[in-house]
Amino acid sequence: MMSEMAKAGRQDWMDGARAMLPLLPGAVPFGMIAGVVASNAGLDALAGIGQSIVVFAGAAQLASTQLIADAAPVFVVILTGLVINLRFAMYSAALAGHLSALPRWRRWLAAYLMTDQSYALSVLRYTARPQMSLAAKFAFYMGGAIPMWTVWLAATAAGYFLGNRIPASWSLDFFVPLSFLALIVPSIADRANAAAALTGGAAAVIAWSLPFNLGLFLAALAGIAAGYAVEKLTPKQGEDA
Amino acid sequence: MDNQTIWLAIIVIGIGTFVLRASFIELGGRFALPSPVTQALRFLPAAVLSAIILPALLRGEAGGLYYGLDNPRLIAGAAAALVAWKTKSVLATLAAGMSVLWAMQALL
């Protein structure tokens, strides 16, 4: 009985790792850039690589490191990182029904390792297989999440030591807006998201001279409002307008 | 920013991010996000990231915003956006953006 349970766990662990495998190479350039930017911003090795352990969230790390390099006030750095990570609350809500019954340290481990990728793969799998046991769900989640954590940490460390050898004249800080472009442009699949992106960008430019990077937060709100409005005003197919 | 302040930022972002990740899992699935909040959060990545991208592309060599077409970051960013849209490839986007930036910086 026990060995059969362990076997089922091993199989789910492998399935989780196999599902994550194709997504791992995509994390490498982002991790390396997070490391390069951290070293160029003047963070020491402990902080530059340590933030990948403490924060473990790519977009937030990139944005907050860039703000540190721009000498923004510390509360702006913190607020920006947290606003970018608000989406995790949404993932947490989606995963709650599946993972809430785990013992506390397993819940906390799963929460700590949550990424866009681990959330998406797990919810897909749990929905496709409603019969999965709690142990199997945890094994599948961890099977994907641990390789992602390892790759992220290794890529940040590699980027940090590489970035230390590259002079500032190479403008490697430009990798930050470029990696955000690579993230966001392909994901703008509908009019509402396009409106959110265009409004957010335009508002940020208009409000650029406001103190404390307040423009960033106003722009985020304006972008969300625009996306929301466009979605409400666009009639959906198969639905009355 | 001194090392202590940097660590303060990293630790507060780290704790806050863990709280966000754990939030609804810890509440035991008893509560759900109201649907207007979920809908609004759907637009957050596009709104925030482009609010970071656009001013970064318009940054002039002197520090302020510079709208001229001879701004290397603006042209390089436009090229990268086009490549991102056409290829959906992260590496192609990064390569296009950096090559255009370096080429323009070398030429201007």
Image (tube, rainbow, N blue to C red):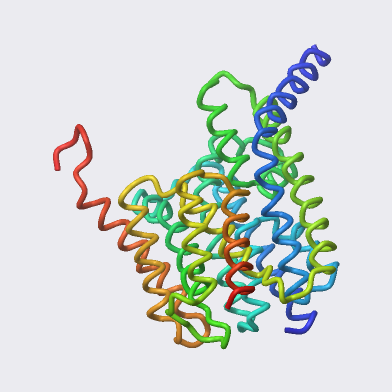
Residue A90 image position (x, y, % from top left) = 49, 49
Q: Is residue B5 left or right of residue B83?
A: right
| In the rendered image, the vertical position of residue A130 relative to residue A90, given as above or below | above
Residue A4 image position (x, y, % from top left) = 78, 13
Q: Is residue A140 visible?
A: yes
Q: Nearer the viewer, residue B100 or A45?
A: B100
Q: Nearer the viewer, residue A50 or B86?
A: B86
Q: Please, which residue is most extreme toward the left here?
A: A240
Q: Is residue B16 visible?
A: no
Residue A75 image position (x, y, % from top left) = 60, 79
Q: Nearer the viewer, residue B89 or A45?
A: B89
Pick the quarter of the image with the C terminus of chain A.
top left
Q: Nearer the viewer, residue B96 or A64?
A: B96
Write the residue at 45% across / 49% down. Answer: B85
Question: How many numbered circles does the render carry?
Answer: 0
Write the residue at 55% across / 46% down. Answer: A92
Write the residue at 60% across / 59% down. Answer: A59
| In the rendered image, the vertical position of residue A129 relative to residue A148, given as above or below | above
Residue A35 image position (x, y, % from top left) = 75, 62
| In the rendered image, the vertical position of residue A110 relative to residue A218, given as above or below | above
Q: Quadrant of residue A224?
A: bottom left
Q: Is residue A147 left or right of residue B12?
A: right
Pick the quarter of the image with the N terminus of chain A.
top right
Write the residue at 69% across / 24% down. Answer: A15
